Image: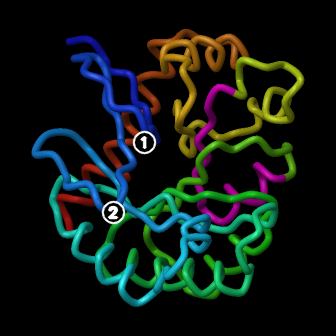
Amino acid sequence: MQTPFIDIHTHMPKLDDHLIQIVNLELEAPCPEQGYYSYGIHPWALDNAGFQIETTMKRLEERLQSPNVVALGEAGLDKMHKASFERQMILFERQIALSEALQKPMILHDVRCHNEIIALRKKHKAKQAWILHGFNGTEQDVKQLIGQGISLSVGEALLHPERKIYAAFPAIDLDFLFLETDMAEVGIQKVYESAARILETDIKTLQSRILENFKQIFLDNSQNS
């Protein structure tokens, strides 16, 4: 049986027998009966007129009840966005608590907030897995985040040698590695090809390692919850 490609975070579902995706859905969208999905409240949602944390959190909790929803996300913090950082913190901490209560791993949005993310993981003594998506940090960032048990997902940035992650990528422990497409047009296989080339390994080995990470965090977690 052919080992599938794992796309840990995407907004663009594709039908492919050799592809497993976690598709990020809007709260308004019902969860399909097949596949793997995530729902979360992005910090940018705070821009919406009339946004209410309590009402939206109740909706999120309802959506997370589906057995096909394997993660809460994306959720997190963004210092480059105009939304009040204080409100971002409140919203994110509410989602951390929900993740722990429902035993759902988290997929994180993090823009210049590594220190805050680490501090909140410690503060909440979070036991659920956290995966920081779209990671494009330095080797020092890699060590700090993985040191707190936070996995890292990398996307099409690996196709650009000028990006920070290109040099830092070999420092990622493979037990904490995922790959993704997010909203990029590039296919996940291209991301795997670039990752394998940087790591000087073959694609099949990389597929096997990431599949094991996926099973451990998402499938084992859902069976035990």
Q: Nearer the viewer, residue 98 or 1?
A: 98
**Along the line of sight, the residue nearer the viewer: 98 or 14:** 14
Residue 68: percent from left, percent from top: 19, 52
**Residue 30, position in %: x, y?**
20, 55
Q: Please name the amino acid that badge 2 sits on.
A: Leu
Quarter of the image with the C terminus is: bottom left
Query: Secondary structure beneath disc 2?
Result: loop
Toward the front, the furthest residue is 49
Residues at circles 1 and 2 in contact by the CB criterion of under 8 Å = no
Q: Quadrant of residue 123?
A: bottom right
Q: Is residue 10 left or right of residue 123?
A: left
Report which residue position mark 1 lands on.
213
Can you name the residue that lies furthest to the left here? 33
Q: Residue at x 58, y 51 (%)?
A: 151
**Magenta region: which residues?**
141-156
Residue 184: assigned label: none
| Sequence-wise first label, 1 or 2 | 2
